[in-house]
């Protein structure tokens, strides 16, 4: 295939708990040698928990890589390779917001940064919510905020939501409900 | 601040050309020690090149991390820290599609993966297009495809577009033009 880059040698640089970083020797489509840096990641899920009042349950948490708080929809990494993504979404929804749901609809996946990261995030819409207790993971410190869907769309359009999965999932939910 | 994670020791693991990988020793809000893995990245820009016929000029390219082709809007990394993002967007637009534009509108930024990656991608809408020659970067092999905006929105809603920046920028452009 005229666009394919072929692996000459896979070089694992850092085998972390979350990131598995590689700098492979490859051959470009024109036959020249080059390097490709990227990180393998297990993958993740995120959920738009939509209440009967058309509010979305969001979470605020500190993101160390950016040294500040982010407003996002509930999300989490898979626990292991090949974990059922619906099960993971139900778990993260319950752990972070205390919610159970009657329906969980898959609304697509995003690949956050295809050139450098294998992470794939599956997005779900959760409706028919009932509430139990939150069960944050050890080391997870989260603040819960309810925001009307229409307001979240406006915040996204004004550039006030930065997280990619939150912007995409909110715009998709709005389109599904209003188009 | 009750959510803050404080750096105890910054540990640079891999100082690559694109990725600068860290595994820092930190102190959690509850006082416990922990590790945080993340990668620093210069940042990037992407552009929705919208023709007078409401078509978007997209690019198909091989993404080595996924070993396959992706359909995306034109995009590229900044050349250096602090590079003017509008200038970078005009450069990538011209290099990848051969287009110049009359207006370039900033339609927001995305942070693809806030927990593990510092990358910020600024999104632009380019209109009033005129065409010159493409000037691909050395080692960049790209196929150009024109797709109507309305069809790209449907493809995004059906889950056929995976790239995060493309999904977000296409939905935002549609919302700006139709709402």
Image (cartoon, coloured by chain):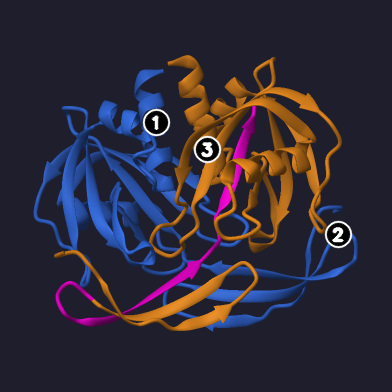
Chain colours: A orange, B blue
Q: Residues within 10 Å of mark 3 (few under 14, many from 20)?
A: many
Magenta span: chief secondary structure = strand
Disc 1 and disc 3 in contact, CB within 8 angstroms: no
**Where on the picture, by quarter, is residue A130?**
top right
Where A96 falls versus B174 (above or below)? Answer: below
Please give the residue where the numbered disc 2 appears in the rendered image: B29
The lab-note entry on whether marks 1 and 2 share a chain reads yes
**Where on the picture, by quarter, is residue A146?**
top right
> Which is nearer the N-term, disc 1 or disc 2?
2
Q: Which residues are magenta?
A: A28-49
Q: Residue at x 83, y 63 (%)?
A: B28
- Whole-number angstrom distance, CA of label 1 to CA of label 3: 14 Å
- Whole-number angstrom distance, CA of label 2 to CA of label 3: 28 Å
| Magenta segment includes A88 | no
Q: Residue at x 48, y 46 (%)?
A: B109
Q: Residues within 10 Å of mark 1 (few under 14, many from 20)?
A: some
Please give the residue where the numbered disc 1 appears in the rendered image: B157
Q: Quadrant of the N terminus of chain B?
A: bottom right
Depth check: A141 or A68 in front? A141
């Amino acid at each position: 295939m005229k666009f394919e880059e072929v692996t000459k040698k896979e070089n694992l640089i850092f085998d972390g708990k979350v990131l598995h970083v590689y700098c492979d020797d490859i051959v470009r489509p024109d036959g020249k040698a080059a390097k490709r840096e990227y990180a393998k990641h297990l993958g993740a899920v995120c959920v738009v928990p939509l209440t009967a009042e058309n509010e979305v349950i969001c979470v605020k948490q500190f993101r160390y890589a950016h040294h500040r708080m982010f407003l996002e929809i509930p999300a989490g990494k898979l626990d292991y390779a090949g974990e059922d993504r619906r099960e993971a979404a139900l778990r993260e929804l319950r752990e972070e917001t205390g919610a159970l749901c009657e329906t969980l609809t898959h609304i697509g996946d995003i690949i956050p940064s295809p050139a450098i990261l294998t992470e794939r995030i599956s997005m779900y819409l959760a409706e028919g919510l009932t509430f139990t207790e939150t069960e944050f993971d050890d080391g997870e410190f989260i603040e819960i905020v309810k925001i009307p869907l229409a307001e979240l769309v406006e915040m996204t359009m004004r550039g006030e939501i930065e997280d990619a999965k939150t912007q995409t999932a909110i715009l998709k939910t709005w389109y599904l409900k209003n188009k």
